[in-house]
Image: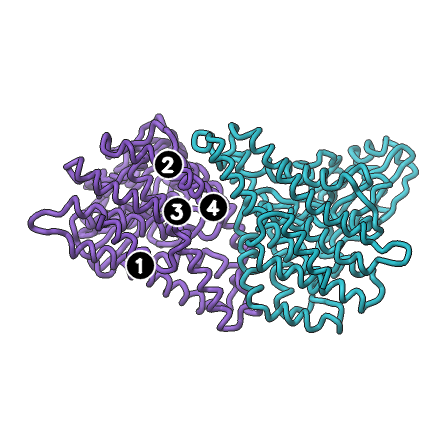
Chain colours: A cyan, B purple
Amino acid sequence: MAAGDEFRPLDEASLVAYIRATPALAASLGGRVDALSVKEVGDGNLNFVYIVTSDAGSVVVKQALPYIRCVGDSWPMTRERAYFEASALREHVPEVYHFDRAMSLIGMRYIKPPHIILRKGLIAGVHYPLLAHHMADYMANTLFFTSLLYNSTTHHKKQVARYCENVEMCRLTEQVVFSDPYMVSKYNRWNSPFLDKDAEAVREDDGLKLEIAELKSMFIERAQALIHGDLHTGSIMVTPDSTQVIDPEFAFYAPMGYDIGAFLGNLILAYFAQDGHADQANDRKAYKQWILKTIEESWNLFQQKFLGLWNKHKDGNGEAYLPAIYNNPELLGVVQKKYMTDLLHDSLGFGSAKMIRRIVGIAHVEDFDSIEDASKRASCERRALDCAKAILKGRRQFESIEQVIAHVRSVTHD
Amino acid sequence: MAAGDEFRPLDEASLVAYIRATPALAASLGGRVDALSVKEVGDGNLNFVYIVTSDAGSVVVKQALPYIRCVGDSWPMTRERAYFEASALREHVPEVYHFDRAMSLIGMRYIKPPHIILRKGLIAGVHYPLLAHHMADYMANTLFFTSLLYNSTTHHKKQVARYCENVEMCRLTEQVVFSDPYMVSKYNRWNSPFLDKDAEAVREDDGLKLEIAELKSMFIERAQALIHGDLHTGSIMVTPDSTQVIDPEFAFYAPMGYDIGAFLGNLILAYFAQDGHADQANDRKAYKQWILKTIEESWNLFQQKFLGLWNKHKDGNGEAYLPAIYNNPELLGVVQKKYMTDLLHDSLGFGSAKMIRRIVGIAHVEDFDSIEDASKRASCERRALDCAKAILKGRRQFESIEQVIAHVRSVTHD
């Protein structure tokens, strides 16, 4: 720790003093800390994020305050989320320069322009030809290498125990994803009055509530892999050539499908928002097809890369499928097909739940919010909501991502 | 700690000195520690167990050595299992007088004669009219009160993290229940040559290996409740009026069905062993019916008591089914039916796995081992094995315990 061991919230001035007193951060700025420019850029829901620039470099400094930023101090939230974010970042992305647990402060690599938040790119209608490849790689690597397909039970349980401490973030997800949208809650919001009946219908849909209970319990109980925990399109920075995942403060051991579903579900939201962004210059039809293609490729490439890792490491230390039992190529094929089908169903369930909560729960998405005409916005949102409800309830009927895409397409043509 | 903080294996003489130096143990013997009788009675696979008697009382002292007793020091095993046993005992049964972590030693209530190990009673053909009630109570209480139906996620994750440290016992189970029986392993044993082809068939049954992989991953990953972890008929002491569960050193957070399955599966083993114990004086036909009735009642009473606890506490702190969402009696009924059906399927899967491993794995059961005629024993074992394989693979088809009993009965009439 560089600057004492008591927590104090920083502002732009005190951050400069903190950086000057912290060698790892000063070094990341080339040691040129006399004239620093500081810009607060946190547009997320939780934390304060500063980009600090010297004449020799830039660094991102992120501080967690003991509440949820977008709600205020009426909703306290542990600062220890910064510890789990730093831990997960170090596991997945090695570019953390400095972590101060007492201050709940992380110094990390600045992801330079022209990187922008993927969600903003999707709203603007920008094509990202490598996005599916990069995200398939990211998900296959992070999920495979933290699962029992690669690790011993001993390693796995030790990691599970450690991330159990990030329970407050887990509870936050429980509440905003799996509970609030299905009950009357002061935190819920929707595009009223247009979606009043739709929000009520979610709260009164027994079939949906039966399924969401199963997903909620699985989310809490099942320690399948170290997930990012918040892998929507606002947690990804992109250029046409580069894809960088940020903000893993929700990281803990949970079902893999929660991450995959978050990514795919948010792409489907982006798809349903396109009609609201269409204008005479661009009807967005081609872009909608590109989004669907990206969803399809993301899953199929993920599956290919994940199975590639499994085959490569099948004689390693992974405890789940011992080579002495699953050594037969035909059996291994059957086992892998079952594993991937179950994972597709989990991903569809969690992805749909994430879509629903973005329409009738506390935190909405800019994809819809940026559609000015509230009535047009409502019709986009309703299609997304109906699509999500149907996929969530019928997820076990889908055997491939192509079938899911066909379903998404069928909703549009209503 | 009473007697230093270094581990040393005790024998009968040094145990007496240890007790004299340990006030809690001396008190449990009425302070009369001058003339103690000590008897080593550990007939289990793992530990040393002493019954110590003074002229004013008795106490059981159990010590874990750093290996598996029935294999010897060629199979090392953490002594910390004693810590988790003491922890689970304190959670479920309050009669632990003394625990010495350095010595891996527990002093606990002596369960007096005429209590005997249930397995021995089942071999002798003794009726236990209250067994189903008592075990239904035990399972409903221990599983419900350590699940998310009763607890907050915060409490749950804290407990999960703590019991993650009992990972060596978890790995032992993985190996002997979910792995070894399905591969060539030096530890496997079976009634050779009679069952040679049957053991080989288990190792070559791809359908079975596909299912056992799912159960194994669920066992490791899913922290549903604090289970006993070894709830077979050798871990239960009985009289016709009393039922006492012992030996929870495998305790950790895992699927509830693992405990329920262990109990029911071992009753089914006892059932198939009866033909080997029949003689002219007693054809065991009525006793077989009693065992089947006990299986049926154990599940049905468990279900009734478990749902009774759920209904009683449905407005409490349990995180899984919030009253604001599941307040509607019709919906709650549907949710509970699904929960119990899933739990039945899990129990059948795990119970069958436990049956299979007792016939072709390392640790067998006295139910069969006490049948002297090896050929008659083989025919009992084969019926049990075939029954278990069919239940494991077809478990999702069963909707009630009565259907399971009908299947067990049909195997007998082969």
Mark 2 residue type: Val
1 or 3: tag closer to the N-terminus: 1
Q: Does residue A233 appear to the left or right of B63 in the view shown?
A: right
Estimate the spatial distance between the alpha carbons at disc 1 and disc 3, rounded to whole Å. Answer: 22 Å
Q: Quadrant of the N terminus of chain B?
A: top left
From the top left corner, tell me how far across and down residue A289 is, in percent.
Answer: 76, 50
> Label 4 near label 1: C-beta < 8 Å?
no
Measuring 91% from the left and 55% from the top, which residue is drawn there?
A281
Q: In this view, does B91 lie above or below B314?
A: above
> Label 2 near label 1: C-beta < 8 Å?
no
Estimate the spatial distance between the alpha carbons at disc 2 and disc 3, rounded to whole Å. Answer: 19 Å
Q: Residue B298 carries which label?
A: 1
Q: Which chain carries label 1?
A: B
> Label 3 near label 4: C-beta < 8 Å?
no
Q: Check disc 4 and report the residue beneath it.
A: B218
Residue B361, image quadrant: top left
Estimate the spatial distance between the alpha carbons at disc 4 and disc 2, rounded to whole Å. Answer: 16 Å
